[in-house]
Image (cartoon, rainbow, N blue to C red):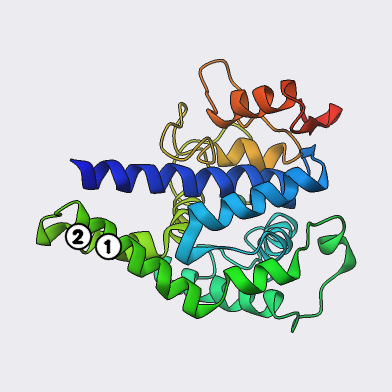
Amino acid sequence: MAVLAFFGLHWYLSLFTQSFFHHRYAAHRQFTMKKGWERVFYVLSFLFQGSSYLSPRAYAVMHRMHHAFADTEKDPHSPQFDANPFSMMWRTRMVYNRIFNKAAQIDPKFVKDVPDWAGFDKFASNNVIRILWIGVYVAVYLLLDAHWWLFPLILIHAVMGPFHGVIINWFAHTIGYINFKMKDTSRNLFPIDLLMWGEGLHNNHHKFSGRANFGVKKFEFDPLYPIIRVLAWAKVVELRKTAE
Ligand SMILES: [Zn+2]
Ligand SMILES: [Zn+2]
Protein backbone atom coordinates (compact mmCIF):
# COMPACT_ATOMS: atom_id res chain seq x y z
CA MET A 1 0.00 0.00 0.00
CA ALA A 2 2.74 2.44 1.03
CA VAL A 3 4.60 1.73 -2.22
CA LEU A 4 1.52 2.50 -4.29
CA ALA A 5 1.00 5.71 -2.27
CA PHE A 6 4.60 6.70 -3.07
CA PHE A 7 4.02 5.88 -6.74
CA GLY A 8 0.84 8.00 -6.74
CA LEU A 9 2.59 10.87 -5.01
CA HIS A 10 5.43 10.85 -7.54
CA TRP A 11 2.93 10.57 -10.43
CA TYR A 12 0.87 13.59 -9.38
CA LEU A 13 3.70 15.84 -8.17
CA SER A 14 5.86 15.22 -11.23
CA LEU A 15 2.96 15.77 -13.61
CA PHE A 16 1.85 18.84 -11.65
CA THR A 17 5.15 20.60 -12.36
CA GLN A 18 5.13 19.48 -16.00
CA SER A 19 1.57 20.70 -16.59
CA PHE A 20 1.69 23.85 -14.50
CA PHE A 21 5.24 25.05 -15.05
CA HIS A 22 6.54 23.52 -18.28
CA HIS A 23 3.34 23.36 -20.28
CA ARG A 24 0.97 26.13 -19.20
CA TYR A 25 3.62 28.63 -18.06
CA ALA A 26 6.82 28.07 -20.08
CA ALA A 27 5.31 26.96 -23.38
CA HIS A 28 1.99 28.83 -23.45
CA ARG A 29 2.50 31.79 -21.07
CA GLN A 30 -1.09 31.52 -19.86
CA PHE A 31 0.08 33.33 -16.72
CA THR A 32 3.17 35.21 -15.62
CA MET A 33 5.18 35.04 -12.40
CA LYS A 34 8.08 36.93 -10.85
CA LYS A 35 11.65 35.66 -11.27
CA GLY A 36 11.78 34.47 -7.65
CA TRP A 37 8.71 32.26 -8.06
CA GLU A 38 10.06 31.02 -11.39
CA ARG A 39 13.16 29.79 -9.56
CA VAL A 40 11.01 28.15 -6.87
CA PHE A 41 9.17 26.17 -9.56
CA TYR A 42 12.46 25.22 -11.23
CA VAL A 43 13.59 23.68 -7.94
CA LEU A 44 10.21 21.99 -7.36
CA SER A 45 10.37 20.54 -10.89
CA PHE A 46 13.78 19.10 -10.05
CA LEU A 47 12.54 17.60 -6.77
CA PHE A 48 9.34 16.17 -8.22
CA GLN A 49 10.55 15.05 -11.68
CA GLY A 50 13.83 13.78 -10.25
CA SER A 51 15.64 11.45 -12.64
CA SER A 52 13.46 12.53 -15.57
CA TYR A 53 13.82 16.29 -15.03
CA LEU A 54 12.92 18.19 -18.19
CA SER A 55 14.41 21.56 -19.06
CA PRO A 56 11.49 24.05 -19.13
CA ARG A 57 13.21 25.87 -22.01
CA ALA A 58 13.74 22.80 -24.20
CA TYR A 59 10.27 21.49 -23.33
CA ALA A 60 8.61 24.81 -24.19
CA VAL A 61 10.39 25.15 -27.55
CA MET A 62 9.58 21.57 -28.54
CA HIS A 63 5.98 21.92 -27.41
CA ARG A 64 5.43 25.14 -29.36
CA MET A 65 6.67 23.25 -32.43
CA HIS A 66 4.11 20.53 -31.68
CA HIS A 67 1.28 23.07 -31.74
CA ALA A 68 2.58 24.86 -34.83
CA PHE A 69 3.17 21.66 -36.84
CA ALA A 70 0.68 19.26 -35.18
CA ASP A 71 0.46 15.95 -37.05
CA THR A 72 2.67 17.06 -39.93
CA GLU A 73 6.19 15.87 -40.76
CA LYS A 74 7.66 18.72 -38.72
CA ASP A 75 5.78 17.73 -35.53
CA PRO A 76 8.36 16.46 -32.94
CA HIS A 77 5.90 13.68 -31.99
CA SER A 78 2.81 12.41 -33.77
CA PRO A 79 1.09 9.02 -34.02
CA GLN A 80 0.70 9.85 -37.72
CA PHE A 81 4.46 9.67 -38.25
CA ASP A 82 5.62 7.26 -35.51
CA ALA A 83 4.90 3.54 -35.65
CA ASN A 84 4.29 3.06 -31.90
CA PRO A 85 4.58 4.93 -28.57
CA PHE A 86 8.16 3.70 -28.04
CA SER A 87 9.51 4.92 -31.35
CA MET A 88 7.67 8.20 -30.78
CA MET A 89 9.29 8.49 -27.34
CA TRP A 90 12.70 7.89 -28.90
CA ARG A 91 12.25 10.47 -31.67
CA THR A 92 10.93 13.01 -29.14
CA ARG A 93 14.05 12.41 -27.04
CA MET A 94 16.28 13.10 -30.07
CA VAL A 95 14.49 16.38 -30.89
CA TYR A 96 14.55 17.39 -27.21
CA ASN A 97 18.30 16.74 -26.97
CA ARG A 98 19.02 18.80 -30.08
CA ILE A 99 17.05 21.72 -28.62
CA PHE A 100 18.61 21.25 -25.16
CA ASN A 101 22.13 21.25 -26.60
CA LYS A 102 21.26 24.24 -28.80
CA ALA A 103 22.27 22.14 -31.82
CA ALA A 104 19.07 22.88 -33.77
CA GLN A 105 18.20 25.96 -35.81
CA ILE A 106 15.10 27.32 -34.12
CA ASP A 107 12.62 29.87 -35.39
CA PRO A 108 12.82 32.83 -32.92
CA LYS A 109 9.07 32.68 -32.29
CA PHE A 110 9.50 29.32 -30.58
CA VAL A 111 12.06 30.77 -28.14
CA LYS A 112 10.33 34.08 -27.38
CA ASP A 113 9.84 34.62 -23.62
CA VAL A 114 10.70 31.05 -22.60
CA PRO A 115 12.29 30.82 -19.14
CA ASP A 116 15.98 29.97 -19.26
CA TRP A 117 18.13 29.00 -16.27
CA ALA A 118 20.95 27.26 -18.13
CA GLY A 119 23.16 26.55 -15.09
CA PHE A 120 20.34 24.86 -13.20
CA ASP A 121 19.20 22.88 -16.26
CA LYS A 122 22.74 21.62 -16.74
CA PHE A 123 23.01 20.50 -13.12
CA ALA A 124 19.54 18.89 -12.98
CA SER A 125 20.04 17.10 -16.31
CA ASN A 126 23.44 15.66 -15.41
CA ASN A 127 23.47 11.88 -15.82
CA VAL A 128 25.12 11.28 -12.45
CA ILE A 129 22.33 13.27 -10.78
CA ARG A 130 19.73 11.27 -12.75
CA ILE A 131 21.26 7.97 -11.60
CA LEU A 132 21.38 9.20 -7.98
CA TRP A 133 17.64 9.89 -8.20
CA ILE A 134 17.01 6.32 -9.38
CA GLY A 135 19.05 5.23 -6.33
CA VAL A 136 16.65 7.28 -4.18
CA TYR A 137 13.63 5.47 -5.69
CA VAL A 138 15.25 2.07 -5.07
CA ALA A 139 16.07 3.11 -1.49
CA VAL A 140 12.46 4.18 -0.86
CA TYR A 141 11.20 0.80 -2.17
CA LEU A 142 13.66 -1.05 0.09
CA LEU A 143 12.73 1.10 3.11
CA LEU A 144 9.05 0.44 2.47
CA ASP A 145 9.75 -3.29 2.24
CA ALA A 146 8.21 -3.49 -1.23
CA HIS A 147 7.30 -6.92 -2.65
CA TRP A 148 9.74 -8.01 -5.37
CA TRP A 149 7.05 -7.85 -8.05
CA LEU A 150 6.59 -4.13 -7.42
CA PHE A 151 10.20 -3.29 -8.26
CA PRO A 152 9.60 -3.02 -12.04
CA LEU A 153 7.55 0.09 -11.22
CA ILE A 154 10.90 1.80 -10.61
CA LEU A 155 11.31 1.84 -14.42
CA ILE A 156 8.29 4.15 -14.58
CA HIS A 157 9.61 6.29 -11.71
CA ALA A 158 12.84 6.68 -13.67
CA VAL A 159 11.13 8.07 -16.79
CA MET A 160 8.05 9.60 -15.15
CA GLY A 161 8.11 12.91 -17.10
CA PRO A 162 8.44 11.43 -20.62
CA PHE A 163 6.00 8.65 -19.63
CA HIS A 164 3.32 11.28 -19.01
CA GLY A 165 4.32 12.96 -22.25
CA VAL A 166 3.71 9.76 -24.20
CA ILE A 167 0.27 9.22 -22.64
CA ILE A 168 -0.86 12.61 -23.90
CA ASN A 169 1.08 12.76 -27.15
CA TRP A 170 0.07 9.27 -28.25
CA PHE A 171 -3.29 8.44 -26.67
CA ALA A 172 -4.74 11.98 -26.70
CA HIS A 173 -3.97 11.96 -30.43
CA THR A 174 -5.52 8.52 -31.12
CA ILE A 175 -8.40 7.76 -28.72
CA GLY A 176 -11.06 9.82 -26.98
CA TYR A 177 -13.77 12.23 -28.07
CA ILE A 178 -13.67 15.41 -30.11
CA ASN A 179 -15.36 18.71 -29.19
CA PHE A 180 -13.73 20.79 -31.91
CA LYS A 181 -12.94 19.70 -35.42
CA MET A 182 -9.27 20.53 -35.98
CA LYS A 183 -6.71 19.91 -38.71
CA ASP A 184 -4.81 17.76 -36.18
CA THR A 185 -5.85 14.49 -34.49
CA SER A 186 -6.13 15.86 -30.91
CA ARG A 187 -8.77 14.27 -28.69
CA ASN A 188 -10.10 14.51 -25.14
CA LEU A 189 -9.27 11.38 -23.12
CA PHE A 190 -11.65 11.95 -20.19
CA PRO A 191 -14.29 14.60 -19.47
CA ILE A 192 -13.29 14.67 -15.77
CA ASP A 193 -9.55 14.26 -15.90
CA LEU A 194 -8.40 13.23 -12.43
CA LEU A 195 -5.55 11.12 -13.80
CA MET A 196 -3.60 13.65 -15.88
CA TRP A 197 -4.24 16.98 -14.09
CA GLY A 198 -6.53 18.07 -16.95
CA GLU A 199 -3.92 17.48 -19.67
CA GLY A 200 -6.20 14.74 -21.07
CA LEU A 201 -8.60 17.46 -22.31
CA HIS A 202 -6.21 17.76 -25.20
CA ASN A 203 -8.61 18.52 -28.07
CA ASN A 204 -9.93 21.50 -26.07
CA HIS A 205 -6.34 22.57 -25.45
CA HIS A 206 -5.37 22.41 -29.14
CA LYS A 207 -8.39 24.57 -29.93
CA PHE A 208 -7.72 27.17 -27.18
CA SER A 209 -4.01 26.90 -26.41
CA GLY A 210 -3.90 30.23 -24.58
CA ARG A 211 -6.69 29.26 -22.18
CA ALA A 212 -5.63 28.18 -18.67
CA ASN A 213 -8.79 26.12 -18.10
CA PHE A 214 -8.74 22.99 -20.29
CA GLY A 215 -12.37 22.17 -19.45
CA VAL A 216 -14.76 23.80 -21.91
CA LYS A 217 -18.10 22.00 -21.70
CA LYS A 218 -20.22 22.03 -18.54
CA PHE A 219 -19.46 18.38 -17.79
CA GLU A 220 -15.69 18.75 -18.16
CA PHE A 221 -13.30 19.35 -15.27
CA ASP A 222 -9.64 20.34 -15.34
CA PRO A 223 -8.37 19.90 -11.74
CA LEU A 224 -5.31 22.10 -12.29
CA TYR A 225 -7.35 25.18 -13.13
CA PRO A 226 -8.73 25.80 -9.60
CA ILE A 227 -5.15 25.52 -8.31
CA ILE A 228 -4.02 28.17 -10.81
CA ARG A 229 -6.89 30.38 -9.62
CA VAL A 230 -5.78 29.95 -5.99
CA LEU A 231 -2.18 30.77 -6.93
CA ALA A 232 -3.43 33.83 -8.81
CA TRP A 233 -5.46 34.89 -5.76
CA ALA A 234 -2.32 34.43 -3.60
CA LYS A 235 -0.41 36.61 -6.12
CA VAL A 236 2.07 33.84 -6.97
CA VAL A 237 1.01 34.04 -10.62
CA GLU A 238 -0.87 36.57 -12.69
CA LEU A 239 -3.35 35.11 -15.13
CA ARG A 240 -3.36 36.76 -18.54
CA LYS A 241 -6.71 38.33 -19.31
CA THR A 242 -6.97 36.24 -22.47
CA ALA A 243 -6.29 33.02 -20.50
CA GLU A 244 -9.37 33.16 -18.24
ZN1 LIG B 1 -1.11 17.59 -29.08
ZN1 LIG C 1 0.12 22.84 -25.33
User: Relative to 8, does residue 138 appear above or below in the rendering?
Assistant: below
Disc 1 residue: CB within 8 Å of ligand 2: no
**Is disc 1 placed on a helix, strand or loop?**
helix
Horizontal arrangement in the rendering, residue 82 relative to residue 208 (left or right)? left
Q: Position of residue 87 (x, y in %)?
A: 44, 74
Circle 1 sits on which residue? 139
Disc 2 residue: CB within 8 Å of ligand 2: no
Q: Amino acid at mark 2?
A: Leu
**Residue located 78% across and 44% down the image:** 29
**Residue located 36% across and 59% down the image:** 157
> Circles 2 and 1: CB distance less than 8 Å?
yes
Circle 1 crowding by C-alpha within 10 Å: few under 14, some 14–19, many from 20: few
Residue 88 numbered tag: none
Residue 125 visible (yes or no): yes
Q: Farthest front residue?
A: 143
Q: Quadrant of residue 33?
A: top right
Q: Position of residue 239 (x, y in %)?
A: 79, 30
Q: Amino acid at mark 1?
A: Ala
Circle 2 crowding by C-alpha within 10 Å: few under 14, some 14–19, many from 20: some
- What number of labels is visible? 2
Circle 2 sits on which residue? 142
User: Relative to 203, does residue 233 appear above or below in the rendering?
Assistant: above
Quadrant in which the N terminus appears: top left
Q: Position of residue 102 (x, y in %)?
A: 75, 79
Horizontal arrangement in the rendering, residue 42 relative to residue 49 (left or right)? right
Q: Nearer the viewer, residue 191 or 157?
A: 157
Q: Quadrant of residue 59?
A: bottom right
Quadrant in which the C terminus appears: top right
Q: CA distance from mark 2 to mark 1?
A: 5 Å
Horizontal arrangement in the rendering, residue 50 relative to residue 151 (left or right)? right
